[in-house]
Image (spheres, rainbow, N blue to C red):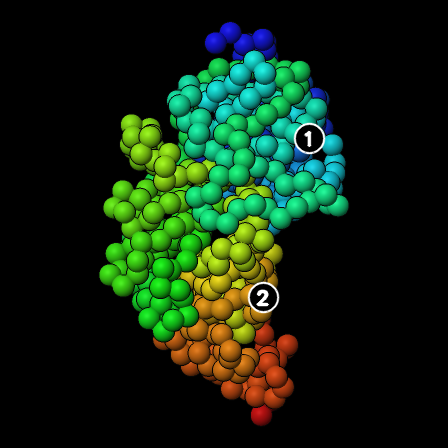
Amino acid sequence: MNLPFPRLTAEQAAALVDHNSTIGFSGFTPAGAAKAIPTALAARARAEHAAGHPFQVGVVTGASTGESLDGELARAEAISWRTPYQSNKHLRAAINAGKTRFFDMHLSTLPQQVRYGFLGKFHWAIVEACEVTPDGKIVPTTSVGATPTFCRVADRILVELNRAHPATLRGIHDIFEPLDPPYRQPIPLNSCSMRIGAPYIQVDPAKIAGIVETDLPDETGKFDPADDITTTIGNHVAEFLAAELKAGRIPREFLPLQSGVGNIANAVLAAIGSHPDIPPFEMFSEVIQDSVIELIRSGKCKFATGTSLTVSAPVLADIYRDLEFFKTRLMLRPQEITNHPELVRRLGIITVNTALEVDLSGNVNSTHVMGSSMMNGIGGSGDFTRNGYISIFTCPSFAKGGKISTIVPLVSHTDHSEHSVQVVVTEQGVADLRGRTPHERANLIVDRCAHPDFREELRGYFEQTKHGQTPATLAAAFAMHQQFLETGDMNNVDWSRYFKK
């Protein structure tokens, strides 16, 4: 197809971007992320810096991205500020060193805050597509994220037309943006497989400043295989849900599942998929991983909708070979829809996310190490947890070879409060916190989720805190953290330092 848009090299496209521009990039995980133009922007930044000139840009994406975007720009010191989520080690180092301004956000709120103008003017949208039409229809590749909103609000658009993804992907996307207040209406979605939008993003073709043709695969990696700990966590979650089903607290036809990203999430899905008492189910989540594709193939997952198809290269190739089969079982939507609290509550989604640490009240830290160092960000876990039918958090009971307990008196940073967290699962067991008082919660979490090496230590804390509604003593709440910072080990805290006889 002859397109009326300038054909540019990545370097020519990067040359159009001014210092201090704000850019909305496609991508939700490395899937569907722009690659060639951000790499060229990084090279330009290095050249400008070598010449003594400033060059940095504001970077906004759907979530994390790949090495060619976050990695290259971070190493080139080309990012002035960043939101809403990242997972790149070089960018993380720049954030924690104070070189890059970063603010964390719930992923469902990002697109609307962009439209409201809360994040300022967007000069560019730089997006990956598998198809562009002369009248301004852009078909994304393996993710949607916040791309529709970036294209709507940006002054100009640059498109990476990536031949690594077939144009026949058209039809797997469902692009819908809600109106903004005071004109917003209920989102007309009542089931996971319901289609409510268009199979493409419609833009004013006059905004498209150029097209860069590429043939670059997604930079997604493969997760580690399940080990004894992640497998045990997965089995605990599956057994808990099967028991809830048997008790009638989950409808007999089951409910849609949301799962976070990573090894534990894959183990949980595998365990649920193989449990004989759990019927075939649907997924309403952010990220569709390899494990979900396996469940679709087996018939255990009837339909999966997300905003990102984050699968390994062999699995993506398998999907493309059998695309017509998957088009009836997969759908990619904007993150504003997949993570929307209205839909999470309406559909009754069972949510499973990962914690870094959990305290005796059930508060969860999912973003910070020792209270101050950012890991990745809250992502969509808050969107789902606060509104889920049942909200579950998983984590191993220990870290650093047993020197860190993930169960602590008080989390060093709070992302999800005790009011939203219903169930905590480690390889030790399951603590069902629903309907429990703070003191009952503390006992359950220690008895069923803490590592045996830390149970008496944790009891040594809350046994001293019987007064009041909640077992807490401010002077000792961070004693385990403080000891780790001083000695590198949380074991054997001397509570007599904090509690008077």
Residue topped by disc 1: 153
Choose between 246 and 285: the one closer to the eye: 246
Instruction: Let me know if residue 396 appears in the view.
Output: no
User: Residue at image x 66%, y 15%?
Assistant: 206
Choose between 270 and 3: the one closer to the eye: 3
295 lies above or below 473: above
Q: Which amino acid does label 1 sit on?
A: Val
State the mark number for residue 61: none
The secondary structure type at the circle numbered 2 is loop
Of circles 2 and 1, which is in front?
1
The span from disc 2 to disc 1 (Cα, nearest Å) is 34 Å
Seen as rendered, the residue at the extreme bottom is 501
Instruction: Point out the image quarter for the C terminus.
Output: bottom right
User: Residue at image x 49%, y 69%?
Assistant: 422
Q: Tally the numbered discs.
A: 2
| Residue 183 image offset from top left, x and y in percent | 72, 43
Rendered image quadrant of residue 288: top left
| Residue 382 image offset from top left, x and y in percent | 56, 56
Q: What residue type is labelled 2?
A: Ser
Instruction: Let me know if residue 371 appears in the view.
Output: yes
Sequence-first tag of 2 and 1: 1
User: Residue at image x 36%, y 73%?
Assistant: 247
The secondary structure type at the circle numbered 1 is helix
Residue topped by disc 2: 417
Q: In this view, does 425 lie to the left or right of 119?
A: left
415 lies above or below 171: below
